[in-house]
């Protein structure tokens, strides 16, 4: 976390059980810790590996200042519907009958082959030696990093062709990852450099981002969203 509004709050699977007190404790204790340690207030919540997300949780999240909910699991029917509409981001109006659009939250389903983890070709971490060795020295024997970058570009093009959004999010990491953060950021920096060198930035801009920045860019793309009137 490097500045204000760059932190996302992870929410555990307690949501599946509908325990309101546990949910409140999770939110409040988590927010207090993040505020104390980093002096920021999370605006984005993650729900990863949960078997569904309840409307009650989503409304509670909005009441506590969450603007966007990123989740992984969705039913096949929901995934098919999102694919038909070419959008994996949706406005979740959890309490329309009583509150209209005042409890709206932006819901984003992670539409990645590897879920919330690295894209294929970039799994290189102390706990994940899937794509090692990773040779970053261009011209040396076994160098294929440019091919990995091109494969990532092809995946990004496919996602943009199947979605109406002009912003997509690709997580880099996984459970208990970044045990050696310097290696990960070395790879990411080289990815940025090679992406530019291959001319791919002329088509798709690749940037370091945070969940909050991603949310704010989505808002810019949807100027009809008002700050006080809901989505």
Image (cartoon, helix red, strand yellow):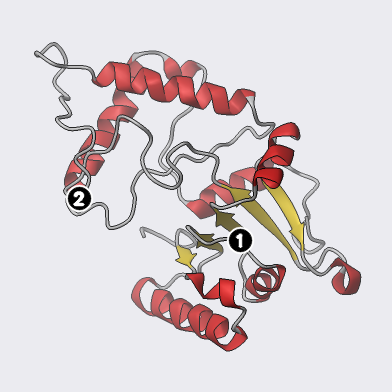
Tell me the distance, in whole angstroms, between the alpha carbons under discs 2 and 1.
28 Å
Q: Measured along the vertical axis of the image, is residue 25 above or below residue 156?
A: below
- Residue at image coords 42%, 40%: 114
Q: Who is closer to the viewer here, 34 or 56?
A: 56
Residue pictured at 46% horizontal, 44% vertical: 115
Give the residue at mark 2. 127
Residue 110's disc number: none
The label on residue 52 is: 1
Q: Within 10 Å of the Cα at label 1, are there few (<14), some (14-19), or many (20+) other Cα atoms?
A: some
- Residue 65, image x, y percentages: 62, 71
Which of the 4 image quarters holds residue 138?
top left
* Horizontal and vertical percent position of residue 187: 24, 35
Circle 2 SS class = loop
Q: Nearer the viewer, mark 2 or mark 1?
A: 1
Few, some or many residues within 10 Å of mark 2 (<14, 14–19, 20+) = some
| Location of residue 181 in the rendering, given as x and y in whole percent from the top left corner | 21, 50
Residue 66 seen in render: yes
């Amino acid at each position: 976390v490097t500045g204000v509004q760059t932190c996302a709050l992870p929410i555990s699977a307690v949501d599946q059980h509908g325990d309101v007190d546990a949910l409140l404790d999770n939110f409040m204790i988590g927010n207090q810790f993040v505020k104390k340690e980093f002096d920021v207030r999370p605006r984005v919540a993650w729900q990863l590996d949960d078997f569904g997300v309840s409307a009650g949780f989503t409304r509670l999240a909005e009441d506590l200042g969450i603007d966007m909910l990123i989740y992984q699991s969705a039913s096949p029917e929901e995934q098919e519907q999102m694919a038909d509409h070419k959008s994996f981001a949706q406005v979740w109006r959890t309490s329309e009958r009583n509150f209209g659009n005042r409890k709206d939250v932006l819901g984003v389903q992670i539409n990645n082959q590897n879920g919330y983890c690295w894209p294929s070709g970039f799994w290189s971490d102390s706990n994940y030696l899937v794509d090692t060795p990773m040779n970053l020295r261009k011209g040396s024997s076994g160098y294929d990093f440019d091919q990995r970058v091109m494969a990532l570009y092809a995946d990004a093009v496919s996602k943009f062709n199947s979605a109406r959004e002009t912003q997509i999010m690709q997580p880099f990491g996984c459970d208990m990852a970044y045990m050696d953060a310097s290696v990960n950021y070395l790879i990411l920096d080289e990815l940025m450099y090679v992406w530019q060198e291959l001319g791919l930035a002329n088509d798709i801009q690749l940037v370091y981002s945070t969940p909050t920045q991603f949310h704010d860019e989505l808002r810019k793309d949807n100027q009809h969203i008002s700050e006080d009137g809901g989505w």
